[in-house]
Image (tube, helix red, strand yellow):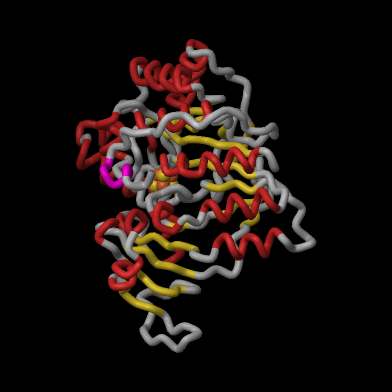
């Protein structure tokens, strides 16, 4: 990309060490500048420098890791159901359109992480990426933060795991293979439907299901593990026998190491945005969703039990184990019910082997293709 053009689109810059003038547009800690570019129409990137990027998972969490790194806040993948939406309000953005279009970029993430990992006190516990927002969202094509982060973790002897919907991950397959010879590496793709039209409507900024299935195949062909998080399954939209059979059959054909599935979870901040979407896109379902979720975040217990039975059946039908996985609770809601991490996401060690597969293609939005 053209650095000059990028510079020319700068919206604002906080005073810097060189005395550069310009008030920050937002009260973001460490804001360097806010920029737009024609290549990412409609999205503003807020470049910040962070003092720390290694976050400890709150005590009491049942997640199978204690540390996370999130190089981006907000996510242009724009999934209507994204449970991280509310976290954007802590930055004075809204949980709806701002979450999709006002993306905070920790431009010094790799450098700061390296410093944190080099501390004598660092115990080299697993670090999880993709726990809040997607580290391979479109911005990563521009900022290339992940290679530095992966290198820093591998060179410090720290196991890592990555969960993403971004086919841009394919760019880093050689690096991940190399990292897997140094430390345990876990990889997970988030994919909960094979219906391209539904995906385009409800996850409009993501590479579509076909592209993500190809990514699963590429990772497996490269000798890397790849679990799949099949969440959220959407009541009346992606929970039919046909939809579940297609999903688990496609994941098996792609070679997924393991899969976990669960129903839509509507925490505050997400719920309002999702219900607006349902009312606009599937008005006939609006009342059914209100009744199914009541005033809470979860579908009724009866529905979840029904869905769990279906999932067990279709997993078994396509050769997936129903017993694998690690329990965890949602990141910032200690009341959240337990879910599982499928085999493949949790690093188990072993080295990568095999040649990279042919270039993936077929990502839905044209802009996604340019990121390979
Ligand atoms: S890809 Fe993940 S983090 Fe990004 S919007 Fe979708 S659910 Fe949220």
Q: Which quarter of the rendered picture does the C terminus lie within?
A: top left
Question: Vertically, is 10 above or below 164?
Answer: below
Q: Residue furthest front?
A: 355
Residue at x 25%, y 60% (from the top left corner) = 38
Q: Could you tell me residue 25's position as x and y percent?
A: 35, 76
Residue 82 visible in rendering: no
The residues colored magenta run 365-369
Depth order, front residue of 8/237: 8
Q: Which quadrant of the figure has residue 354?
A: top right
Depth order, front residue of 119/337: 119
Q: Could you tell me residue 294's position as x and y percent?
A: 38, 38
Depth order, front residue of 98/169: 169
Residue at x 66%, y 48% (from the top left corner) = 154
Question: Vertically, is 365 above or below 228?
Answer: below
Say if the magenta span includes residue 368. Answer: yes
Residue at x 39%, y 43% (from the top left corner) = 295
Residue 216 visible in rendering: yes
Q: Does 104 sit left or right of 37 as displayed?
A: right
Q: Which quarter of the rendered picture does the N terminus lie within?
A: bottom left
Say if the magenta span includes residue 66. Answer: no
Q: How many marks?
A: 0
Question: Vertically, is 343 above or below 312?
Answer: below
Question: Vertically, is 184 above or below 112?
Answer: above
Q: Could you tell me residue 286's position as x and y percent?
A: 26, 36
Depth order, front residue of 79/50: 50
Q: Does 179 sit left or right of 358 as displayed?
A: right
Residue at x 79%, y 62% (from the top left corner) = 120
Q: Residue furthest top?
A: 317
The dominant secondary structure in magenta is helix
Q: Where is ligand 1, by quadrant?
A: top left
């Amino acid at each position: 990309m053209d650095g000059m053009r990028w510079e020319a689109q700068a919206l604002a810059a906080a005073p810097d060490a060189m005395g550069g003038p310009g008030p920050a547009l937002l009260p973001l800690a460490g804001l360097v500048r806010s920029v737009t570019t024609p290549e990412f129409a409609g999205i503003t990137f807020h470049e910040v420098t962070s003092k720390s990027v290694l976050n400890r998972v709150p005590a009491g969490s049942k997640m199978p890791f204690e540390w996370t790194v999130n190089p981006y806040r907000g996510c242009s993948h724009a999934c209507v159901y994204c449970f991280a939406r509310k976290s954007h309000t802590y930055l004075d953005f809204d949980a709806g359109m701002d979450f999709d279009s006002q993306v905070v970029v920790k431009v010094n993430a790799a450098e700061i992480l390296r410093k944190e990992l080099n501390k004598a006190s660092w115990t080299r516990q697993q670090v999880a990426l993709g726990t809040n927002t997607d580290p391979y969202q479109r911005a990563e094509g521009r900022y290339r933060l992940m290679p530095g982060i992966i290198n820093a973790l591998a060179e410090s002897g720290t196991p890592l795991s990555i969960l993403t919907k971004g086919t841009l991950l394919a760019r880093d397959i050689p690096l991940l293979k190399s990292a897997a010879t140094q430390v345990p590496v876990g990889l997970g793709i988030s994919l909960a439907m094979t219906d391209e039209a539904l995906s385009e409507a409800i996850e409009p900024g993501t590479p579509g299901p076909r592209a993500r299935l190809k990514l699963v195949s590429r990772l497996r062909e490269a000798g890397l593990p790849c679990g799949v998080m099949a969440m959220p399954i959407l009541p009346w939209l992606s929970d039919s026998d046909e939809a579940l059979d297609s999903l688990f059959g496609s994941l098996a054909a792609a070679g997924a190491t393991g899969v976990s599935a669960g129903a839509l979870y509507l925490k505050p901040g997400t719920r309002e945005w999702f219900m607006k979407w349902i009312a606009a896109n599937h008005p006939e379902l609006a009342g059914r969703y209100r009744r199914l979720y009541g005033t809470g975040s979860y579908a009724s217990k009866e529905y979840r039990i029904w869905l769990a039975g279906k999932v067990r059946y279709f997993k078994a039908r396509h050769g997936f184990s129903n017993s694998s996985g690690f329990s965890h609770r949602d990141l910032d809601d200690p009341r959240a019910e337990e879910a599982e991490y499928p085999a493949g996401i949790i690093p188990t060690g072993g080295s990568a082997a095999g040649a990279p597969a042919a270039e993936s293609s077929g990502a839905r939005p044209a802009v996604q293709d340019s990121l390979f």
